[in-house]
Image (spheres, rainbow, N blue to C red):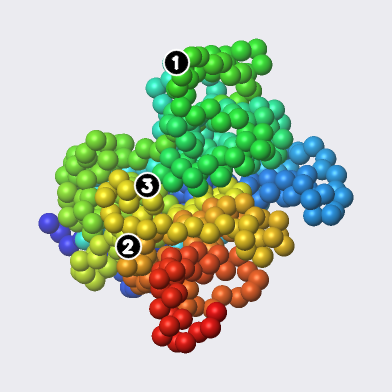
Amino acid sequence: MTKPEFDLCIIGGGAAGLSVAAGGAALGAKVVLIEKHRLGGDCLYYGCVPSKALLHSAQVAHTLRDAARFGIHADLQPVQLDRVMQRVTSVIQSIEPHDSPERFRSLGVEVIFGAGHFSDPHTFCVNGKDITAKNFVLATGSRPATPPLPGLDSIPYLTNETVFSLTAPVPSLIILGGGPIGIELAQAFARLGSRVHVVQRGAQILPKEDSDLAQIVADTLRDEGVQLHTGCTPQRVERTAGGLRLHLATGTGGTEILETAHLLIATGRQPNLQDIGLEAAGVLLEGGQLRVDRRLRTTNKHIYACGDIAGPYQFTHMAEHHAGVVLRNTLFHLPAKTEQRVIPWCTFTDPELARVGFSETEARAQNVAHRVYTFPFHDIDRAQTDGATQGRAKIITDPKGRLLGAALVGAHAGELIHEYVLALAKNMKASDLSNVMHIYPTLAQINRRVADQRLKEGLTPRAKKWIKRIFRLRG
């Protein structure tokens, strides 16, 4: 075989591929990046960026509508969705230059646009050109998965790839799927004036979270007018004069019919692996997923995968972590492996729900010896001043107090969780958090207060009796 032309050939220009390309070029590698559409990927155009921009506009509308609670008089005019979506687009455009082909070419990355495929284990063909490299990186991302619902192929429906293109009013909306994407968009559209239904097959929304924490989010959504249909299975969908009609089988054995103007599918993701010549490359799949090891190598050890297609956590921050693992393996030949223990995430509803490490449910299911401690936002002074008293913090420790996991449901939970991320990464105990000073008044005090519950547990009447005796206390 002739000497490879590039050190790295990256296929896919989303968050994972761009991180590998920028990092590789900065380290002195010769890098080529191949993308069939535009750089930026799902996160920039259809995911994190537009959804959080939409949620922020919805938060502003909610604050105005609820202003009397803070002693302020405000009138909210009917929301003009086209203007909201214009702002969403402007946010995307403000970030686009960072992901532009011009920027990456200035970094020394060769950027090629086109759809290509492997012709053999060492060659990727695009636009009639054969690309050879020491290592290849698959970073082709994922796309919405659509359920096998009778009638779905005969009606127009929305996904995260089309919902941000809406400009006309959305009087009513059914969302299939009660995971983070579905729940975030449900709250956003409800706050912008839509009548929203969420249909979830399971017994609770946000099924990966502890039920007590997910219930706080569910109660908030219901208070804001979102109708949650849990334990329900879609049977079929059909067109009507005003939109569409969805037939459901309920968990109690009955049926229910929902009529709406729009339908949004948020039932999961599937990897983009079609038509890229994986068989010719010697890359095997298992159940439609890439077979990768913890070093992110596929069954062809010179072809790596990162981002959504490497799974199982489809987060932009995980894609960036993957990029570091791939670079250490491919350029420095270090046996770097993906993190499996300390992986944080957040559902950006209001209140937010963030977690890292073991949940209480997981600890029980795996028979891990553990203790659970909680503390409510209601008892944090800053939460009272801000009118943000919903929710609680929860930590999971082993019997000796070492942290196993943490979760927060409440205001700014996605920011507050990072104290626990560091604590878990450094194998700290709850007492380490108790011993650290936290600024008053901040919401971050909840991290210390929940850890204090561990200390208070040990202050039994017997312990107090001995403390008084040893130190000659008179109380």
Q: Whole-Å distance between the Cαs marked 2 and 3?
A: 14 Å
**141 vs 2: above or below:** above
Q: Are marks 1 and 3 in contact (CB under 8 Å)?
A: no
Q: Quadrant of the N terminus?
A: bottom left
Instruction: Name which of mark 2 and mark 3 comes first in the sequence.
Output: 3
Kindly give the residue lying farthest to the left in the view shown: 1
Residue at position x 37%, y 72% from top?
A: 428
Residue denoted by label 2: 398
Q: Quadrant of the C terminus?
A: bottom right
Residue type at mark 1 is: Gly
Instruction: Name which of mark 1 and mark 3 comes first in the sequence.
Output: 1
Q: Is residue 178 visible?
A: yes
Q: Position of residue 341 (x, y in %)?
A: 32, 59
Residue type at mark 3 is: Thr
Instruction: Name which of mark 2 and mark 1 comes first in the sequence.
Output: 1
Assess disc 2: are there few (<14), some (14-19) or many (≥20) residues with their C-alpha within 10 Å of its C-alpha: some
Residue at position x 32%, y 43% from top?
A: 116
Q: Which mark is residue 253?
A: 1
Q: Whole-Å distance between the Cαs marked 1 and 3?
A: 28 Å
Mark 2 vs mark 1: in front: 2
Q: Which mark is residue 413?
A: none
| Residue in the foreground of this view, choosing between 235 and 144 | 235
Residue 296 occupies which quadrant of the picture? bottom left
Residue type at mark 2 is: Asp
Q: Whole-Å distance between the Cαs marked 2 and 1?
A: 42 Å
Q: Is residue 451 visible?
A: no
Q: Position of residue 277 (x, y in %)?
A: 24, 40
Residue at position x 44%, y 69% from top?
A: 461
| Residue in the foreground of this view, choosing between 249 and 38 | 249
Residue at position x 62%, y 22% from top?
A: 260
**325 vs 365: above or below:** below
Residue denoted by label 3: 361
